Image (tube, rainbow, N blue to C red):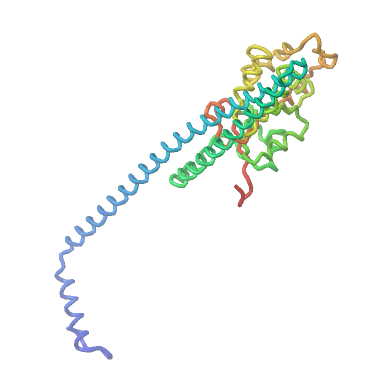
């Protein structure tokens, strides 16, 4: 029985009575069926959304792989162009030293090679930027994988602790020599002005085998880092080639630290070396301070380099790219 409360109207009471009648006669199995259908529809939509996300991530991943191949192709062409430029410079220097004439021709060849390097540099930079945007798109599509890049990360202000001091013995424990990845170039500047033997791989003079030998020998003798600055070009293979010119098997022996075992470094000595390079001058305490660093401005080095060397990515402060 329904009682007319104060403020209620007969039409409201009638409405409540109708609702109560419907609820009393409602079949609960219908509600359960509706809930199951709704849940099934929600699961179907979630599965479709997940499938779409996975397909999109797969599409972007394929795109990244293709762009990575294009970027490596550009880097290889740029590397070859730099080698050609260095060859032309050496030819010109030879002509001048031997008074062979034809310097106008050699100078023009240098200008042509420089123009080719400039053009390929622009193409490589564009490929690098396109690849970076595709990788960003992939990270945004799969944010859970954002921090899966191998290796170490640090800021420029932390380079001394990470590289020079090896705080935490991360580098020693890994066993590989560091590849410092810093598109800004600040890491290269930092290493150049430390107590290091610095090799600019874009400088033909620095890549002469004898200069490399003495740079390596000096770093071992005095217990300091040897730095190969690869700049914005993938010149790691060129460095390996030049090390092989110095001594067969030297590249591998240096990279796997075999050169440091059983006084293997003494094979680098030559009769013309001064008394400061007498075998007795190579002290264990100083040899322990020897380091080998590669530094590059290429944001995405080739996969084989990331396996051979320990990636150390330099992160810019927030708000900087």
Residue closest to the far top: 271
Query: Which residue occupies the foreground of this view, 210 or 215?
Result: 210
Picture residue at 28% right of the left edge, 90% below the top: 7
Query: Which residue occupies the foreground of this view, 127 or 270?
Result: 127
Residue closest to the far right: 275
Hey, which quadrant is residue 237 in on the image?
top right
Q: Is residue 271 above or below residue 312?
A: above
Hey, which quadrant is residue 223 in on the image?
top right
Residue 200 percent location from the top left of the image: 70, 29
Picture residue at 72% right of the left edge, 11% below the top: 267
Residue 47 percent location from the top left of the image: 31, 47
Which quadrant does the N terminus fall into?
A: bottom left
Query: Which residue occupies the foreground of this view, 29 or 313?
Result: 313
Residue closest to the far bottom: 6
Query: Which residue occupies the foreground of this view, 85 or 65?
Result: 85
Residue 73 percent location from the top left of the image: 51, 29
| Circle count | 0
For residue 92, side relative to residue 148 (left or right): right
Picture residue at 62% right of the left edge, 32% below the top: 115
Residue 12 percent location from the top left of the image: 22, 84
């Amino acid at each position: 029985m329904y009682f007319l409360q104060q403020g209620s109207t007969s039409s409201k009471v009638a409405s409540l009575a109708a609702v109560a009648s419907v609820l009393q006669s409602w079949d609960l199995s219908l509600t359960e069926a509706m809930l199951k259908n709704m849940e099934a529809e929600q699961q179907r939509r979630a599965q479709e959304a997940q499938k779409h996300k996975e397909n999109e991530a797969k599409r972007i991943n394929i795109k990244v792989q293709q762009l990575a191949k294009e970027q490596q192709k550009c880097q290889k062409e740029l590397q070859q162009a730099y080698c050609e430029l260095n060859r032309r410079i050496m030819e010109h220097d030879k002509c001048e030293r031997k008074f062979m004439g034809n310097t106008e021709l050699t100078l023009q060849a240098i200008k042509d090679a420089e123009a080719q390097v400039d053009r390929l540099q622009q193409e490589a930079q564009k490929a690098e930027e396109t690849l970076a945007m595709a990788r960003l798109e992939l990270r945004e599509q799969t944010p859970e994988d954002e921090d899966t890049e191998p290796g170490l990360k640090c800021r420029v202000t932390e380079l001394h602790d990470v590289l020079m001091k090896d705080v935490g013995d991360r580098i020693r424990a890994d066993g590989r020599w560091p590849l410092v990845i810093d598109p800004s170039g600040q890491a290269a500047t930092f290493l150049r002005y430390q107590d290091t033997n610095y090799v600019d791989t874009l400088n033909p003079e620095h890549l002469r085998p004898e200069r490399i030998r003495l740079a390596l020998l000096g770093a071992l003798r005095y217990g300091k880092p040897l730095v190969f600055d690869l700049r914005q070009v993938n010149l790691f293979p060129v460095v390996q080639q030049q090390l092989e010119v110095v001594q067969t098997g030297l590249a591998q022996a240096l990279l796997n630290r075999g050169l440091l075992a059983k006084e293997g470094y003494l094979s680098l000595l030559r009769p013309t070396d001064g008394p400061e390079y007498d075998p007795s001058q190579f002290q264990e305490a100083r040899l322990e301070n020897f380091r080998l660093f590669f530094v590059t401005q290429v944001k995405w080095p080739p996969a084989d380099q990331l396996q051979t060397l320990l990636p150390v990515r330099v992160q810019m402060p927030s708000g900087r790219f």
